[in-house]
Image: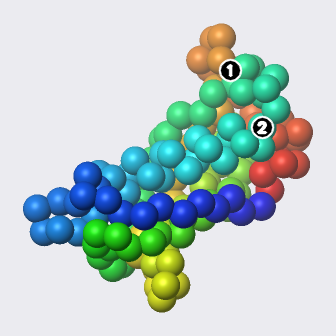
Amino acid sequence: MAFQKEIVVSHDDLDDLNHVNNVRYVQWIQDISKEHWQTVATAKMQQDVIWVVLTHHIEYKRAAVLDDLIVVSTHIESSSGAKCVRIVEMKHGKTNKLLVRSSTEWCLLDSKSYRPIRIPEEIKEIFL
């Protein structure tokens, strides 16, 4: 179940080469992941558990520049035990060409103990 949003590149997003800064892409990966969780998960789920990043793998395919429209989409590719793999893709809004693709491994923790817990079926049902 994909989740999507659009971003327009601003001056604050640019690096010294006038391309979107790599750090900004990482922030957008984090942002859409959090927004997807907060939009779909129930209030109880959000209260009982938290997600932490274990690994990021990011492929930078093309540069984005000032005023480009970027379509950011995310979905859960797989899950096992306490871990899931979330894919984020960013495409140019006019050409639909892939700019960035990331694969992030997340771990689910109990919000009180901070210990890993198996991903419950009710969470899998709304994200897979």
Tell us which disc is closer to us: 2 or 1.
2
The residue that mark 1 highlights is 110
Q: Residues within 10 Å of mark 2 (few under 14, many from 20)?
A: some
Q: Is residue 4 visible?
A: yes
> x%, y% of residue 11?
24, 58
User: How far across and down, in percent of the image, does residue 120 sit?
Assistant: 83, 35
- Reply above or below: 39 against 108: below
- Residue at the (72%, 27%) spot, across then down: 46
Sequence-first disc among 2 and 1: 2
Residue at position x 42%, y 59% in the image: 57
Tell me what residue is drawn at x 64 percent, y 62 percent: 4
Label 1: few (<14), some or many (≥20) within 10 Å? some
Q: Is residue 105 left or right of residue 59?
A: right
**Placement of the C terminus among the 4 image quadrants:** bottom right
Residue indicated by mark 2: 41
Closest to the observer: 8 or 79? 8
Per the image, label 1 sits on a secondary structure element best described as: strand
Residue 54: image x %, image y %?
A: 48, 41
Query: Pointers 2 and 1 in contact (CB under 8 A)?
Result: no
Q: Is residue 29 left or right of residue 115?
A: left
- Is residue 81 visible to us here? no
Q: Nearer the viewer, residue 82 or 28?
A: 28
Q: CA distance from mark 2 to mark 1?
A: 15 Å
